[in-house]
Image (cartoon, rainbow, N blue to C red):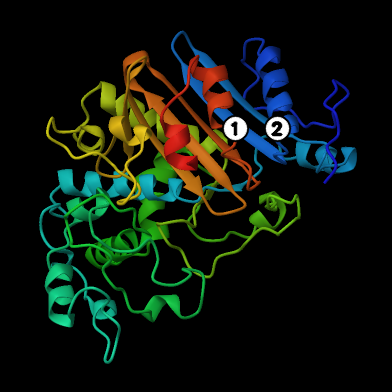
Amino acid sequence: MKKIIYSFVLLLAVVACTTKQKDYSKLDTAFAQIIATDSVPAISVAYIAPNDTFYCKEIFNPQFYTQGQTDSLKMHSNESVFQAASLSKVVFAYIVNKMAQRGEIDLDTPVEKYTNLDRFEKEGGDYGRFTKEQSLEMAKKLTPRIILSHRTGLPNWSASPSSDQWPTSHITFKFEADSCYGYSGEGFALLQRAVEAIKGKTIQEIATEEVFAPLGMTNTSYAWEEKYDTLALDGYNRKGENRGKGRHPRANVGYTLRTTAADYIKFVKTLMDGINSNDPAAVAMTNIAPDAPKAIRYAKEHRDCDSTMYWGLGVGVEQNPQFGKAVWHWGNNGNFRALFIILPEHNKCFVYFTNGARGHDIVNKVTQELMGGTFAIEPWINS
């Protein structure tokens, strides 16, 4: 797609979350320039800092949207819904940690106590580098703590999680359970089954009661809602081609959350406030033991950006030389990319959502504008 040079006559919908804002025109201009330069269709950003600093805007790129389209989107002020991708996991992790504090689930009890392990045993199945007996033994050792810290040894997905075959697909271990960091959506899906069995409710019902309703996250859901027919944005691949809204067949805590920046920042702020007030659930999610292993993303390739990266019970933690502890998570559903970062020591946090496959190309540009610096998070995600 041919790039259109950015100008101030942009066909951008710049929509405020609140009428009580300071003058953030420089940030508006900066984000408009960023998405124009990097061919990102739209960005929704929410940012909170001390002294009542609050910024929340949606900006649409004229390379992808006509004036008529942006005028239509303005009718739903700051309610454009994005796929949150793996930011879905953090809401779920928070719920699990809250349940643990109430004694509803034990973080160190094997999930086998709460749900069956049928997907780990298949007649004639391929068990990879392990025997069937070894695989079943490791599956029986998986606990919520191991799952939330991504130390299961499981693959991200055994099959496409939106496919018909995924719910009954056979899960094979990649590594020995609890031996090293290894990002896995399958682990979270297994824990979802356990939580639903404990509560006797669907994850949508649980999340609504625990998080969405109390925080007023009215446009957030793990399951598709009818209003998303209008509010959900289409996603665009790296070629700039529209690939649609990407509806998912079932609620999955690993990736199906849909939300707005205006909604999700409420959750991020709750987590930040919990860290700073020593809320047990928030502290459990973000505390890193002195001898904790690094979150080395690629087992056979130790990169410089891995040296300051750790994983808590549901979130990444970077020990940043400039900012101290940075609590974060990224989301990547292909044509939808997202990121949040919390700086507890500075009482700052932000979240941004994009509906384009280039949405993580802009990580350091966004952090420079909002936090005044860059993070190892960017190469950890992208390289």
- How would you rate the neighbour count of disc 1 (Cα within 10 Å): few for under 14, some for 14-19, many for 20 or more? some
**Mark 2 belongs to which amino acid?**
Ile
Decide: is 84 above or below 115: above
The residue identified by callout 2 is 35
Q: What percent of the width, then of the height, locates residue 126? A: 30, 82
- How would you rate the neighbour count of disc 2 (Cα within 10 Å): few for under 14, some for 14-19, many for 20 or more? many
Question: Nearest the camera: 359 or 280?
Answer: 359
* Residue at the spot 38% in from the left edge and 79% down from the top edge: 169
Left or right of residue 343, residue 231 in this image: right
Left or right of residue 80, residue 373 in this image: left
Report the label total. 2
* Residue at the spot 84% in from the left edge and 43% down from the top edge: 69
Query: Extreme bottom residue here?
Result: 124
| Mark closest to the chain's N terminus, 2 or 1 | 2
Decide: is 20 above or below 10: above
**Mark 1 belongs to which amino acid?**
Ile
Alpha carbon distance from label 2 to label 1: 8 Å
Q: SS class of the residue under badge 2?
A: helix
* Residue at the spot 23% in from the left edge and 62% down from the top edge: 175
Decide: is 257 above or below 288: below
The residue identified by callout 1 is 362
Question: Nearest the camera: 117 or 136?
Answer: 136
Q: What percent of the width, then of the height, locates residue 42? A: 70, 39
Evaluate if marks 2 and 1 touch, with contact meaning CB atoms under 8 Å apart: yes
- Residue 215 quadrant: top left
Question: Nearest the camera: 145 or 364?
Answer: 364
Q: SS class of the residue under badge 1?
A: loop
